[in-house]
């Protein structure tokens, strides 16, 4: 062991091994050293199979290291031997709680590559379903985040209401979670009879329910103590780390791709970008709650103004985009979801690279939790809102 | 033998005080069985109540409305493989749940269910109770240590720190209640029975004494006892979402169930302390104001009427069950259960009617005893419900916040209440 010198001071796990060094002089009897803990991959609060190696001084977090890849399925590689249309359902398996958003990003990216544009009615349908999915995603986030902090009940409330959204999805395309709702060039399915009525009913149903979630948490003393000034990240840090979505907006940066580079039909709607001030867990909570309300606004406008017309653009049966590359990104519930597609002119993409918001946002974890306690790590993992299917792809 | 039994039933002191070994043993057995059954009932109730807080049904499959779920769980836990991790300290690992269980059950030796319905009337009852109930934390700390694993260790550390910060405030709140016992007589008492009796002498539950002083002391105790029993929102020692299962992460099967048994038994025990100290223990409402024999009779009907209510609910449940043949056995089961409750109700009502004369007849003695136990259990049940309610509503405090509240908020307040109570007590008397 003596020849073994370890320079990788940041590598927590190798630090642990170096503690076993037999050459070190005898330590005093009452020795204290850091505790290295594996949080995950099997852990109730890491939202799947995230493994975080924690270096602790008592309960204080000295450093973290995320180990990812337990859910890696090679989605990007799969794309290289599927046709463009065949790859579309795989996309849903990345962020499986916001599958509709994933599909929207991919379809729009390929449409851009093909230089076609979806008809206006299709765009409206896309906006309605995507915003519904944003609410569903935020509801799932709220439930699990509250559960992580110890409040069990919001989880059941949010799941009850998320069910209504999933029912609409199921009626529209037959699937609840991995919807495969959109096709390249528009939508496969026309809306079902009573779609608009049901969506409108959902709007009136869910608005008071969001107040109900807030009644449980927003002014709750324990909730405030657990979330205020926890997991702070400054706007500069967030931008430097590439953080996007509600996490970035909670730090006070008004950056939302729906406004910054409008896609689908977002430029036609009137809505606000909620932002926070402190960039702490509480602000991220408030931002997401406000976003749910803004989504309701968007859906209301869209469903009232939904135009008649075709839902599918003229797209060749065999999709063969011209040689070239494209980067297209949308505002998924968790942040900027980007697709970089390289076409070699064949029926299959040469390379698809996904920029998943969860993966990039997860990088901020270490910055956020250093110096906090173990309980805060859980709160911060929850507040970043990661889906491991998207982190690992 | 009957004369032996009757000799006790005629006396008005606890078996321990009377030196009556036979009845003391009987009481221990009755309490052991009673608490175990109460824990099972609590298990079912918590799951049902929690479920209804959370817009779901809870256990519905094992027996009608999941009534047999605790039994199924107990059998499952007993049959499960009992794992001791290879690197654990075997002996300590084995003994840890027993420490917790022992502490939880020992407390009941001084809990007075009535003026003579207790195992013993120890003259330092409350001190004994505080000492033994805080011993339960030792079981948790030792379990975390013996597991030789990170999460249990952190859970144990949290539990130890938590106990240290809350025991002090809890003790001071208790002292301010004990101070109140000395008001009429000039000499206070630490005896659990004596504390309730002095509340009767002063015609006031100590929660309303020197309002709001008694109320604040009670509030401090009510918060501290949640921390003491490691229940939400102070359940940091097991904090499922943080430490997987905290101190009992490595435990399984029967050993794990002993921890659960100890936890629930401790919950009942600390609620009993609160009821004894502040809520008039076994006394029915307004024992001094409404003391006419008529009122005695009316209040003695309560136990029977409660069971009648439960029986009615069960019968309604039977009637509302779907008519499908799939539910036939469940329907029969619930009907039998309802009939059993109804029978108990009838029995209690008969005793209440038969024992309405305040003489020393067996029925009157029984009637009196049932009344004491009923009011005591009812008050404790309210606390049990509160425990569930807290768990459904609140997020979990963080470790350092809990310590801060314990030392910086609760300790000064309880000290202040103690001092002010003493001053007011001197001024009044």
Image (spheres, helix red, strand yellow):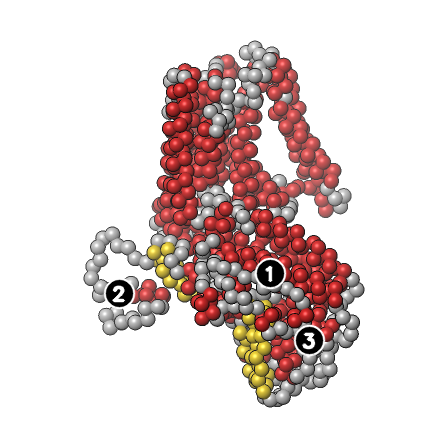
Question: Which of the two residues, B153 or B234, is positioned nearer the viewer here?
Answer: B234
Q: Which residue is mark 1?
A: A291
Q: Please tell me how crowded label 3 is: few (under 14), some (14-19), or many (20+) other residues with Cα within 10 Å.
A: many
Which residue is at 46% across, 24% downward? B210
Q: Please tell me how crowded label 1 is: few (under 14), some (14-19), or many (20+) other residues with Cα within 10 Å.
A: many
Q: Are marks 3 and 2 in contact (CB under 8 Å)?
A: no
Q: Quadrant of the C terminus of chain A?
A: bottom right
- How many labels sit on residues? 3
Q: Give SS at disc 2.
A: loop
Q: Quadrant of the N terminus of chain A?
A: bottom left
> Is tag 3's residue or tag 2's residue first in the polypeptide sequence?
2
How far from the left and from the top, in percent, is residue B50? 58, 44
How far from the left and from the top, in percent, is residue B409? 41, 40
Which residue is at 53% across, 27% downward? B376
Q: Nearer the viewer, mark 1 or mark 3?
A: 1
Q: Give SS at disc 1.
A: helix
Q: Nearer the viewer, mark 2 or mark 1?
A: 1
Q: Which residue is mark 3?
A: A183
Q: CA distance from mark 1 to mark 3?
A: 27 Å
Q: Give me the chain letter of mark 2.
A: A
Q: Which residue is mark 2?
A: A21
Q: Please tell me how crowded label 2 is: few (under 14), some (14-19), or many (20+) other residues with Cα within 10 Å.
A: few
Q: Give me the chain letter of mark 3.
A: A
Q: CA distance from mark 2 to mark 1?
A: 52 Å
Mark 1 and mark 3 on one chain: yes
Question: Which of the two residues, B108 or A393, is positioned nearer the viewer here?
Answer: A393
How far from the left and from the top, in percent, is residue A247? 51, 63
Q: Nearer the viewer, mark 3 or mark 2?
A: 3
């Amino acid at each position: 062991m003596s020849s073994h010198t370890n320079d990788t001071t940041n590598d927590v796990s190798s630090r642990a091994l170096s503690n076993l060094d037999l050459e070190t002089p005898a330590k005093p009897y009452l020795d204290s050293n850091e505790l290295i803990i594996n949080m995950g991959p099997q852990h109730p609060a890491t939202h799947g199979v995230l493994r975080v190696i924690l270096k602790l001084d008592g309960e204080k977090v000295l450093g973290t290291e995320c180990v990812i890849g337990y859910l890696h399925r090679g989605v990007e590689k799969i794309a290289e031997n599927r046709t463009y249309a065949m790859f579309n359902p795989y996309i849903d398996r990345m962020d499986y709680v916001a599958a509709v958003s994933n599909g929207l990003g991919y379809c729009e990216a390929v449409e851009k590559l093909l230089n076609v544009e979806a008809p206006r009615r299709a765009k409206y349908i896309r906006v309605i379903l995507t915003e519904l999915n944003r609410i569903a995603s935020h509801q799932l986030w709220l439930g699990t985040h509250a559960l992580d902090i110890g409040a069990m009940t919001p989880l059941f409330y949010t799941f009850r209401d998320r069910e209504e959204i999933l029912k609409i999805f199921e009626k529209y395309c037959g699937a609840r979670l991995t919807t495969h709702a959109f096709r390249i060039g528009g939508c496969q399915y026309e809306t079902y009879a009573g779609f608009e009525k049901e969506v409108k009913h959902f709007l009136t149903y869910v608005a008071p329910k969001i107040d109900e979630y807030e009644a449980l948490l927003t002014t709750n003393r324990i909730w405030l103590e657990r979330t205020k000034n926890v997991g702070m990240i400054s706007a500069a840090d967030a931008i430097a780390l590439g953080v996007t979505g509600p996490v970035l907006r909670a730090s006070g940066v008004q950056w939302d791709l729906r406004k910054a580079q409008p896609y689908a039909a977002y430029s036609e709607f009137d809505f606000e970008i909620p932002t926070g001030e402190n960039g702490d867990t509480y602000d991220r909570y408030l931002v997401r709650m406000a976003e749910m309300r803004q989504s309701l606004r968007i859906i209301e406008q869209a469903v009232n103004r939904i135009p008649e017309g075709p839902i599918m653009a003229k797209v060749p049966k065999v999709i063969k985009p011209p040689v070239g590359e494209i980067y297209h990104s949308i505002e998924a519930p968790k942040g900027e979801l980007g697709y970089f597609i390289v076409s070699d002119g064949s029926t299959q993409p040469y390379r698809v690279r996904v920029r998943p918001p969860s993966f990039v946002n997860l990088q901020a974890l270490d910055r956020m939790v250093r110096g906090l306690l173990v309980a805060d790590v859980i709160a911060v993992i929850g507040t970043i809102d990661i889906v491991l299917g998207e982190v690992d792809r | 033998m009957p004369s032996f039994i009757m000799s006790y039933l005629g006396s008005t002191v606890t078996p321990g005080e009377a030196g009556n070994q036979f009845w003391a043993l009987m009481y221990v057995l009755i309490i052991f069985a009673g608490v175990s059954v109460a824990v099972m009932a609590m298990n079912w109730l918590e799951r049902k109540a929690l479920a209804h807080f959370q817009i779901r049904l809870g256990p519905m499959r094992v027996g009608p409305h999941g009534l047999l779920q605790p039994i199924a769980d107990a059998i499952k836990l007993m049959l499960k493989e009992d794992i001791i991790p290879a690197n654990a300290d075997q002996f300590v690992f084995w003994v840890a749940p027993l420490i917790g269980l022992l502490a939880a059950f020992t407390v009941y030796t001084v809990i007075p269910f009535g003026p003579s319905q207790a195992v013993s009337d120890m003259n330092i009852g409350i001190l004994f109770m505080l000492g033994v109930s805080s011993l339960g934390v030792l079981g948790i700390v030792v379990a975390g240590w013996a597991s030789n694993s990170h999460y249990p260790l952190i859970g144990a550390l949290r539990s130890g720190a938590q106990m240290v910060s809350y025991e002090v405030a809890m003790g001071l709140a208790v002292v301010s209640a004990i101070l109140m016992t000395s008001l009429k007589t000039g000499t206070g008492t630490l005896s659990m029975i004596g504390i309730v009796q002095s509340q009767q002498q002063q015609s006031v539950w100590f929660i309303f004494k020197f309002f709001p002083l008694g109320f604040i002391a009670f509030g401090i105790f009510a918060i501290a006892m949640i921390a003491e029993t490691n229940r939400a929102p102070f359940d940091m020692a097991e904090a499922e979402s943080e430490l997987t299962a905290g101190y009992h992460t490595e435990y399984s099967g029967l050993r794990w169930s002993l921890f659960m048994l100890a936890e629930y038994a401790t919950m009942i025990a600390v609620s009993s302390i609160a009821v004894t100290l502040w809520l008039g223990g076994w006394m029915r409402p307004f024992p001094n104001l409404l003391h006419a024999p008529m009122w005695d009779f009316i209040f003695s009907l309560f136990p029977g009427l409660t069971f009648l209510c439960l029986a009615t609910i069960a019968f309604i449940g039977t009637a509302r069950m779907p008519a499908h043949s799939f539910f036939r056995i469940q329907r029969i089961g619930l009907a039998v259960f309802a009939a059993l409750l109804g029978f108990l109700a009838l029995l209690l009502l008969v005793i209440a009617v038969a024992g309405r004369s305040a003489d020393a007849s067996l029925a009157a003695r029984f009637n009196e005893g049932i009344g004491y136990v009923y009011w005591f259990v009812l008050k404790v049940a309210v606390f049990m419900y509160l425990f569930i309610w807290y768990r459904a509503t609140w997020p979990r405090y963080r470790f350092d916040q809990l310590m801060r509240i314990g030392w910086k908020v609760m300790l000064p307040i309880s000290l202040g209440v103690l001092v002010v109570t003493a001053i007011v007590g001197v001024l009044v008397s």
